[in-house]
Amino acid sequence: MTGAPVSSIRNLGPAVEAACLRADITSAQDLRTLGADTAYARLLATGTHPHFIGYYALVMGLQGRPWNDCQGDEKRKLRARFDAIKAANTPTPKSELEQILDQIGVLEPAAKR
């Protein structure tokens, strides 16, 4: 890792830093370069559970603002962005039947579907 750690950004602590490392975001500069939306999509793609407060804390942190500074129309717009990122980057859960077929090896791997 080179440069300042992700946790040097306001609102972002060790848990976010660990999630960023799983997403190959290794520094505060990497995060700034990617921007909040792209970075959050990468976090979701590498297993981070979607959470609106976590998303807008990231957005606010990249702006140097406290996490709870987001209100009103700005918060509504961020919610719409969060919902779009979540919809595009969160896999649809498998049905019970698909889970059983997957367990016994009947379904082909998701990468081939």
Image (cartoon, rainbow, N blue to C red):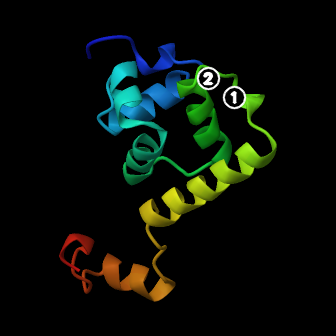
* Residue 88 x/y as whole percent: 44, 64
Amino acid under disc 1: Trp
Closer to us: 37 or 97: 37
Identity of the residue furthest to the left in this view: 112
Q: Secondary structure at mark 2?
A: loop
* Residue 39 x/y as whole percent: 41, 41
Please, is residue 66 above or below residue 36 in the view?
A: above
Question: Which residue sits at x=81%, y=45%?
Answer: 72
Question: Which residue sits at x=40%, y=20%?
Answer: 28
Closer to us: 99 or 26: 26
Please, is residue 34 above or below residue 50 in the view?
A: above
Q: Secondary structure at mark 1?
A: helix
The residue to which callout 2 is attached is 11
Please, is residue 51 above or below residue 85 in the view?
A: above
Question: Which residue sits at x=23%, y=80%?
Answer: 113
Classify 10 Å Cα crowding around label 2: few (below 14), some (14-19), many (20 and above): many
Quarter of the image that includes the N terminus: top left
Question: Which of the 4 image quadrants contains residue 19?
Answer: top left
Classify 10 Å Cα crowding around label 1: few (below 14), some (14-19), many (20 and above): some
Label tally: 2
Q: Earlier in the sequence, mark 1 or mark 2?
A: 2
Q: CA distance from mark 1 to mark 2?
A: 6 Å
The residue to which callout 1 is attached is 67
Identity of the residue furthest to the right in this view: 72
Q: Are marks 1 and 2 in contact (CB under 8 Å)?
A: yes
Question: Which residue sits at x=34%, y=39%?
Answer: 23
Residue 36, numbered circle: none
